[in-house]
Amino acid sequence: MKLIILGAPGSGKGTQAKLLAKDLKLKHISTGDLFREEYKKETKLGIEAHKYWGKGNLVPEDITKDLILKNLPKNNYLLDGYPRTIYQAKFLDENFTPDFIIVLDVPYHTLKFRLLRRAEIEGRSDDTEEIIKERFKVYRKQTSPLLKYYKDKIILVDGDRKIEEIEKELIPILKK
Ligand code: AMP
């Protein structure tokens, strides 16, 4: 099975992706985590990519493609944070057509509240108020068109609930 989880920054996609991947025995691939790891390891790709994600912008397509090609298995994975553009969705479709796209729907005020709380707890460097604003702008402009692109495969879930409740709703649908 090939799954994609989509949602705005703060929608809980990382948390949900980890739970679902464990339950469904899929490899969890978070491009955000991979970029952060590459940066920590001070690789060329990591340092170059940080120039963009550090400011809340998307990492350019050629670098992102290198990262995904390096990390994507043939099957049985859950992609979290990829695709984020129509270009990436088309690339994926040419090679690894996904089975389902899970979309976590969360109102803006909840997203903002969660991100600012995460900033206090985790101290992620791109969770400052200014960078959060930029990430929302990027999501609206570059990532939200994917909802239309994938419209026939989307499972839309209310993400403004407890983590376990969301997982409980999704598992039976995905295991069908
Ligand atoms: P995330 O942890 O998913 O919020 O990702 C953190 C940051 O990594 C994003 O704000 C982007 O700058 C970058 N990033 C992650 N995935 C992608 C992608 N598919 N395309 C471009 N940039 C990405």
Image: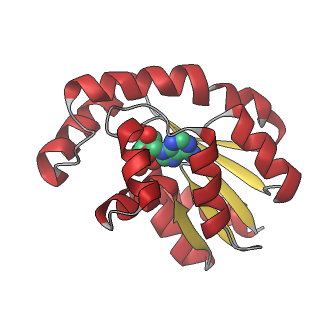
Q: Is residue 20 visible?
A: yes
In the rendered image, the quadrant that contains the N terminus is bottom right
| Residue 155, horizontal then vertical, whole percent | 69, 45
Identify the residue at horizontal 42%, vertical 25% (top origin).
Answer: 136
| Residue 6, horizontal then vertical, whole percent | 58, 43
Could you tell whether 86 is left or right of 58 in the image?
right
Residue 89, picture quadrant: top right
Could you tell whether 103 is left or right of 151 in the image?
left
Identify the residue at horizontal 60%, vertical 68% (top origin).
Answer: 71
Q: Is residue 15 visible?
A: no
The furthest residue to the left: 120
Residue 149, picture quadrant: top right
| Residue 138, horizontal then vertical, whole percent | 48, 25
Could you tell whether 1 is left or right of 18 in the image?
right
Residue 146, picture quadrant: top right
Identify the residue at horizontal 40%, vertical 29% (top origin).
Answer: 135
Residue in the foreground of this view, choosing between 36 and 4: 36
Residue in the foreground of this view, choosing between 107 and 69: 69
Identify the residue at horizontal 18%, vertical 53% (top origin).
Answer: 122
